[in-house]
Image: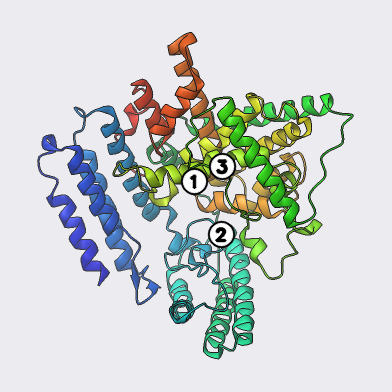
């Protein structure tokens, strides 16, 4: 049923192309809307349809869209409209790349997650852990449908996973074991709530998850799991729109790690007579730290005119600690036990100020701003999370910004914590590059990350495992924090050089934010009028 829709959409996109010289931004928006509607991953009777026919149809649609967008002549358009054009083209290329290189439905067992218990690419039918017992008949019906689809979904996974890779299988085994334990717990809770049919369905989902793990363990999985250096470099330039090549990223990444390690040791020497901050012992203490940090942060941003703080950006309600997939495991230790604290909790449970800068004027602000953005294309989240360069780059930039503008001046140990966090993020860069170049295995990458994070991380740390799993499964995700920040700093320096003493930090940040959530290469083009970085991004060679 979905195949005719996809095929018809591909024909429509080609048919509306018309004479390329007549194209307008309105044409771009229309084609973009058509593409986004048609490219949704197919689902049939509640089960993802990743059959060869369905995937071939989707790949053909992506190819048609890339060809059409590449033929569109936007050279006479204003720069903001041209930036939209290149962003939409990059998004269509991301779907091409997904089919030609990533092929998660064939290579990555974690793609077939039936529960949405963590970030990362997955099937569209994965559902969040429900509140139990279900509050009404509609919630019970949704849960029944979700649980009923699990065995059939994992049966489809067995048919689809035809190109298994060793490290991805290891990660998939761990993920599906967690899901089995979660379904077991769900079955017990539903039985206790006297909902026997739902309890039986949850037990069947648990059995299907365990059987899938057993099947996966028996499969032959050879070869490296990275996508290869050339494919990685292509993705960085023509999808994420980075102006750096592989070797430049490697050299810059190593310099950033060295810089932050040096700054950490200088700060430790300066504060050597002061003990490290203690950690909070319970959830109440955790939330109190966050509330204080958020209140101080908003006041600091306003008083120091760092950026225009809208009235709707306020201290958020209690969120609790960030929960990673491993933390959701019923077998995991409690959140405030020593064994339950991961690397980021070690930092945040002492002083969360720079991490709150990452989240409050970073992610929380971005998502609220995007929800208010009336512009077609820019108001949408990008497919395949290719906007994470802008999202994570801005948030990571804010961590350093508030330190350099004095937010931690009266908190010397918090400044040390900041450099520990920065060194950890820099330590992620080389492992991501090496694992995708197929120089290192996942274990070697994880070993390097743990060894070069100065404190609070072992190879078994939830944060390290989670981060490296994400960066292997979704190339560029770790790169985006650091190199998004580096691009933003480059833009700031360029604007400051251009404006001289008239440069104003508030105005700079407000102009940057006003561009919306799009690759920073395109933001720079809009703010400076300089197209030297984008010139080579319009025409891409074949995907390696």
Number of numbered tags placed on the structure image = 3
Q: In the rendered image, which residue does mark 2 sit on?
A: 118
Please state if 295 lies on the left or on the right of 364 as rendered: right
Q: Could you say whether the residue bearing mark 1 is in a helix, strand or loop? A: loop
Report which quarter residue 350 is drawn in.
Answer: top right
Query: Residue lying furthest right in this view?
Result: 273
Q: Quadrant of the N terminus?
A: bottom left
Q: Is residue 197 visible?
A: yes
N-term-proximal mark, 1 vs 2: 2
Q: In the rendered image, which residue does mark 1 sit on?
A: 228
In contact (CB < 8 Å): disc 1 and disc 2: no
Please state if 141 lies on the left or on the right of 416 as rendered: left
Residue at point 76%, 38% (across, down) = 454
Neighbour class for label 2 at 10 Å: few (<14), some, many (≥20)?
some
Residue 74's place in the image compared with 164, above or below, is: above
Q: Position of residue 292 (x, y in %)?
A: 68, 42
Q: Quadrant of the C terminus?
A: top left
Residue at point 80%, 54% (across, down) = 281
N-term-proximal mark, 1 vs 3: 1
Viewer-nearest residue: 80 or 308: 308
Residue 351's place in the image compared with 327, above or below, is: above
Q: Could you say whether the residue bearing mark 3 is in a helix, strand or loop? A: helix
Viewer-nearest residue: 341 or 153: 341
Residue at point 12%, 34% (across, down) = 21
Q: Is residue 231 visible?
A: no
Viewer-nearest residue: 267 or 58: 267
């Amino acid at each position: 049923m979905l195949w005719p829709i996809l095929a018809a959409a591909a024909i429509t996109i080609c048919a509306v192309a018309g004479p390329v010289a007549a194209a307008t931004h309105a044409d771009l928006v229309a084609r973009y809307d058509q593409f986004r509607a048609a490219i949704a991953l197919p689902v049939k009777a509640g089960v993802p349809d990743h059959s060869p026919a369905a995937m071939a149809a989707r790949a053909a649609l992506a190819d048609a869209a890339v060809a059409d967008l590449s033929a569109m002549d936007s050279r006479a358009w204003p720069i903001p409209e041209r930036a939209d054009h290149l962003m939409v083209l990059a998004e269509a290329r991301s779907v091409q790349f997904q089919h030609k290189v990533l092929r998660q439905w064939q290579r990555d067992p974690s793609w077939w997650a039936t529960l949405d218990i963590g970030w990362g690419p997955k099937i569209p039918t994965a559902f969040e852990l429900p509140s139990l017992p279900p509050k009404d008949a509609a919630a019970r019906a949704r849960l029944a449908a979700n649980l009923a689809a699990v065995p059939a979904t994992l049966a489809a996974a067995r048919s689809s996973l035809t190109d298994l890779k060793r490290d991805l299988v290891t990660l998939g085994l761990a993920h599906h074991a967690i899901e089995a334990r979660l379904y077991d717990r769900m079955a017990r809770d539903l039985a206790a709530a006297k909902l026997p049919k739902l309890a039986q369905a949850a037990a069947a989902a648990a059995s299907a998850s365990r059987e899938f793990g057993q099947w996966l363990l028996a499969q032959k999985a050879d070869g490296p799991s990275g996508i290869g250096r050339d494919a990685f470099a292509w993705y960085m330039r023509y999808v994420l729109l980075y102006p750096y090549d592989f070797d430049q990223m490697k050299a810059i990444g190593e310099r950033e790690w060295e810089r932050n390690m040096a700054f950490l040791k200088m700060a430790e020497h300066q504060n050597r007579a002061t003990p490290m901050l203690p950690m909070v012992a319970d959830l109440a203490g955790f939330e109190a730290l966050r509330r204080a940090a958020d209140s101080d942060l908003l006041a600091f941003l306003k008083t120091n005119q760092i950026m225009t703080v809208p009235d709707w950006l306020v201290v958020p309600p209690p969120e609790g600690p960030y929960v990673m997939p491993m933390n959701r495991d019923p077998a995991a230790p409690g959140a405030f036990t020593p064994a339950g604290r991961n690397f980021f909790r070690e930092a945040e449970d002492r002083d969360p100020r720079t991490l709150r800068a990452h989240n409050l004027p970073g992610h929380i602000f971005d998502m609220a701003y995007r929800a208010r953005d009336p512009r077609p294309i820019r108001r949408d989240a990008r497919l395949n999370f290719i906007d994470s360069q802008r999202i994570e780059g801005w948030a990571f930039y804010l961590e350093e910004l508030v330190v350099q503008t004095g937010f931690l001046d009266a908190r010397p140990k918090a400044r040390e914590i900041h450099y520990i966090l920065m060194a950890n993020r820099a330590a992620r860069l080389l492992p991501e590059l090496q694992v995708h170049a197929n120089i290192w295995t996942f274990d070697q990458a994880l070993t390097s990350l743990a060894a070069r994070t100065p404190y609070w991380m072992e190879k078994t740390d939830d944060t390290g495992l989670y981060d490296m799993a994400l960066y292997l499964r979704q190339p560029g995700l770790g790169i985006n924090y650091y190199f998004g920040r580096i691009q933003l700093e480059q833009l700031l320096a360029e604007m400051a050089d251009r404006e001289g003493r008239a440069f104003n930090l508030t105005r700079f940040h407000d102009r940057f934010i006003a561009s919306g959530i799009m690759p920073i290469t395109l933001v720079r083009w809009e703010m400076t009028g300089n197209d030297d970085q984008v010139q080579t991004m319009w025409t891409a060679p074949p995907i390696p």
